[in-house]
Image: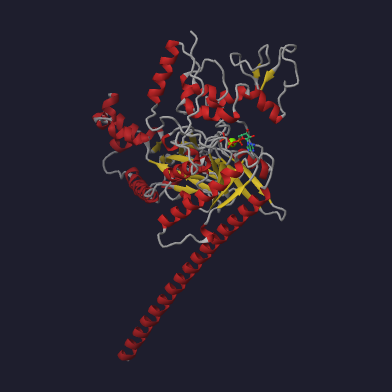
Amino acid sequence: MHKALHPRAVALGFGHRHYPSSLLCRVHIPSASYAHVYTSRSFTSTWPMAQAQESGTADSTDKDPNTSADASVDGWPTTAEGLPDYTAEPRGRAKGVEWKLRAKGRNFVDFCRIKVSGGQGGDGCVSFHREKFVAFGQPNGGNGGRGGNVIFEASSNETSLQHIPHTASAPRGVHGKGSLMHGHSGKDLVIKVPMGTIIREVPSPEKEKDSDSGDEDNVPFHKLLELGETEAKDREMSKRWVLYPRLTNAWTTLPEGKINYFEEAQAWVAEEDRIVEARRAAMSKKPLLLDVNEHTEDNTAFMVARGGGGGYGNPHFLTTQNRAPKYATRGREGQTRWLTLELKTIADAGLVGLPNAGKSTFLQAVSNAHPAIAPYPFTTLNPYIGTVDYPDSYQVKVADIPGLIRGAHRNVGLGHSFLRHVERSKVLVYVIDIAAEFGVKRQVKGVDDWTPEEEYNQQEAAADTETVAAAPTVEKDTSVHADYSQPFEDWKTLLDELEAYQPGLTRRPSMIIANKADVTEVAPKNLQLFQKLALEEWARRRATINPGSSTAADADIRIVPVSAKYKKNIVKVTSILREIVEAEKAKESEAVKRQEQREQQDEEEASHVKATRRNILHAQSHGQSKVEE
Ligand SMILES: Nc1nc2c(ncn2[C@@H]2O[C@H](COP(=O)(O)OP(=O)(O)OP(=O)(O)O)[C@@H](O)[C@H]2O)c(=O)[nH]1
Ligand SMILES: [Mg+2]
């Protein structure tokens, strides 16, 4: 059955292909109208051809499609007319995009869960020296080695959490052997984590399961296995002890009057267990929280799960009375933790903008990064970092992230979880398309009442009736008047979405890049109005934050018109960016210095108080002794 083309497929440049609904639901572009707005200016029916010509990378633009069977436009095989054939199997880049949209070839992961377990300790050994003419040799069982630890190592070479496994268990320690051979310790398991990772301990899901299970757990072990009491005790004992074969049931079969040294040893071990348990409980009182931030040095190691201690060999229990202890202890269990890892990319500045605003183009213009650039929304699916190099070797790291759209905080578009990658940025750089069509509402039709189910139903209904998706419609703003500015509306959308993600995020030092200023038909007029409205809005927002503050010149947001595509006015942007970043860094280092000074003062005061108290006590005791004399 021929299925109707989903509007989102149109937006992303795909033809009448059969898309599984899972793919279509992955990129939540809620309705056709939003996508079509993008088609209105830069997106034509033959856009891949246009793009290929624009980038100059197309492999087939100069080939005659009729003569070559391999002719393709941006990965799509061509029809006889030379147009991309969307019904055919995509190749190259188009295939890559499809793969990415299905989230199959995910090469960037910024959130994951992991269960880490330290290795179990090796068991101690029960052994006695054997030699000709030495009838009863001394005990010589070796101790077990300790289990390996799980260690997270900060690494500047990693950029994703893709390689983090679901579970990580360090190897166990080797058991001790006779002739006092101690077991080797298990090797530490080192997992590299990228800079910017936040590691949080979360409650164990398994523990919850345990508590949920009914009374079955309270049934004694031996009853479950239908074992005898003694046998069950043996089994229970063997969890903690390694017993010499002939010692089995020793605690029940000892002759009258004989001291049970094993009981004595059990008491020692129980006491040690209690201390170890108390220490572990004290250490795990607070859930683990580690932040691998910009102050962390490369290769810094964080222990996240300790290995268990090795068991004692039988010489450990040797006393003057008991010359042949026939028991050794088993190794302890390693520590187990459930962790979540969240990667928040570290950059000095974060680019925030609507899809197609030209964020990636700007990053490419200012840095040596080569992000994907294309005239359709959501080209960028993962954050991308570029470094701006200044002539004096100063560097500013800039993060390019996927485009935000209105309603992103309700998971519209790609959602807004990727904003975690600008959370740590010192400066926010808003990238605005200043050539956005005047009077065209770049809004998502019916976003407010959009639900995935509704969309799914619509999709199904469309498929049943075999109707082709409606032609792109551009919703014209009927209330067009002189004060309406599309770039300004876009910027307000960005501010609202940032605030919805994290209240207060828009208070960061910011600047605005009015991109696409080369589109001279609309850009100059738009810029004038945008500047006026944006400055007013910024002043209003600042006033609401701190009603006392005036609209001082230093509080104004800087707006710079640029053309990222043709690299015009770029130097001005980079110099302003550096100015803001440097000022912010200076502020930060001043705050750190002030904190250090305060700590030093507190320390000095504390030592002074201590010294005074000591002097008073000394004087008092001295006075007393004089009185006694
Ligand atoms: N005329 C003109 N076009 C530009 C300029 N900057 C970017 N573009 C075009 O705008 C389109 C989108 O550019 P991108 O850099 O991919 O946009 P983006 O903001 O990264 O988009 P997403 O990754 O989808 O969020 C491309 O076709 C660019 O060639 C500019 O300064 N002038
Ligand atoms: Mg991009």
- As rendered, which of 627 and 177 lies closer to the eye? 627
Residue 17 appears at what percent x and percent y? 54, 15
Residue at horizontal 54%, vertical 15%? 16
- Residue 49 vertical placement versus 315 (above, below): above
Please, which residue is most extreme toward the front here?
A: 481
Residue 265 appears at what percent x and percent y? 36, 46
Corner quadrant of residue 160: top right
- As rendered, which of 120 and 213 lies closer to the eye? 213
Quadrant, the C terminus: bottom left
Residue 378 appears at what percent x and percent y? 55, 32
Residue at horizontal 63%, vertical 33%? 373
User: Quick check: 55 left or right of 104?
Assistant: right
* Count of numbered marks: 0
Q: Is residue 580 shown to the viewer in this render?
A: yes
User: Quick check: 208 left or right of 294?
Assistant: left
- Residue 597 vertical placement versus 411 (above, below): below
Corner quadrant of residue 246: top left
- As rendered, which of 404 and 476 lies closer to the eye? 476
- Residue 470 vertical placement versus 246 (above, below): above
- As rendered, which of 437 and 25 lies closer to the eye? 437
